[in-house]
Image: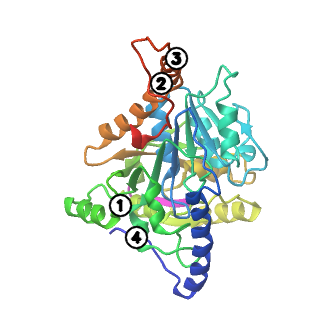
Amino acid sequence: MEGDFIKINEWLLPLSWLYGLGVKARNQLFELGVLKSRSFKTPVISVGNITVGGAGKTPHVEYLIRLLKDQHKVAVLSRGYKRKSKGFVRADKDTPMRMIGDEPFQMKQKFPDITVAVDRDRCHGIDELTDSNDKEAADVILLDDAFQHRYVKPGINILLVDYHRLIIYDKLMPAGRLREPKDGKSRADIVIITKCPADLKPIDYRVITKAMNLFPYQELFFSTIDYCPLKQLFGGEELPLEQLNDKHVLLLTGIASPKQMQEDLTAMGAKINALSYADHHQFHKKDIRRINEVFASMAEPKMIVTTEKDAVRLEDVEGLSDEVRKSIYKLPIKVSFMLDQEEEFNHKITGYVRKNSRNSILVKEKDEHKPQNSHHTGNGPRTISFRNN
């Protein structure tokens, strides 16, 4: 059921109250204009959440990439969590994972023709990616995990809310997992309830819609996870999901919320033995020894399943046994929209990008500078905003 993965540490609530004061003060500075949010001529779409990890940002960004990449020059800009570099880094085919972080590296591997960059200063990163002197300048920027990065004012602000960790039931850190008070959701143009069970009933949609209590300018969507065929990490073999049935599976994860994946694989008939690490975990020698030992002790038939994000951190580690290397598979995922909402969502995204693309803006600016006796009077400059479209 919704919110079933939430755990509140009641004894930490006083610290959450203090944390909340700091976050509210910062947000108030932006509301008063003391801290400035900056708009851009290039379409900017932000995807983020107000909880700590696990809402499905990467697969939703990848959905947007697939939607836009054939018609536009797409750039993904991320902070590059736990990378070993500083400043702005634009990835190429040879950029190692440690220089940009696991999630940007994953997206660059899957979509080599798009631009993937990292920069802690998102405004600076957008400037670099939209330089008018660069013939490869991006037509649209996708900001990964930037809901709290308020120095950028995106044209569309997408908030992801995990079905199993609904923000309306959660508390601020450290007692809960909220990064900011739940009323921060008012900044979103689009809210997506992610990781919904495929068999969600109509009454559940109505209950969640009412409980989220969104404003009229906000639109609510529901998405679910679709699992793709398994892909061998150290080889080219691809296995259908049916191969999981009745197998002993070592589920190896370093993600924020592995519980849903464990339940889904169990439902597919897998007998799960889980090894779970913290989100973005870097695998060390002792971890590798543990993986080898646990897998060697498991009964046949057996295999190892890991996530795409973990796979990019496992590819270069040393010490995996030959048995592990031939038995480890990554499980790709995609998101799909429920309630036949896909066409509506796609239309909102593509319509915004099309209306605010570089070519469209140039045409508008040209019209605005025509002589007074022109048939086109122009409407003057305006802020690019989803709410105005």
**The residue under label 3 is which amino acid type?**
Lys
Are the residues tagged 1 and 2 within 8 Å (C-beta)? no
Q: Which mark is residue 70?
A: 2
Q: Which numbered disc, 1 or 2, marks the residue closer to the eye?
A: 2
Which numbered disc, 1 or 4, marks the residue that appears first in the sequence?
4
The answer to which image quadrant residue 283 occupies is bottom right
Q: Secondary structure at mark 2?
A: loop
Q: Is residue 301 magenta?
A: no
Are the residues tagged 3 and 4 within 8 Å (C-beta)? no
x 35%, y 34%: residue: 347
Per the rendered image, the range of residues in magenta is: 245-252
Label 1 crowd (10 A; few <14 / some 14-19 / many >=20): few
- Distance, label 1 to label 2, CA atoms, is 36 Å
Left or right: 143, with 82 as reference point: left
- Distance, label 1 to label 3, CA atoms, is 58 Å
The x, y position of residue 187, in whole percent, is 47, 55
The x, y position of residue 154, in whole percent, is 53, 44
Q: Which numbered disc, 3 or 2, marks the residue closer to the eye?
A: 3
The x, y position of residue 375, in whole percent, is 39, 12
Which numbered disc, 1 or 2, marks the residue that appears first in the sequence?
2
Are the residues tagged 1 and 3 within 8 Å (C-beta)? no
Residue identifier under label 3: 366
Question: Magenta region, mostly helix, strand or loop?
Answer: strand
Residue most toward the front? 372
Q: Secondary structure at mark 4?
A: helix
The x, y position of residue 316, in whole percent, is 72, 46
Q: Which numbered disc, 3 or 4, marks the residue closer to the eye?
A: 3
Label 4 crowd (10 A; few <14 / some 14-19 / many >=20): some
Considering only vertical position in the picture, is 4 above or below 225? below
Residue identifier under label 1: 267
Residue identifier under label 4: 168
**The residue under label 2 is which amino acid type?**
Asp
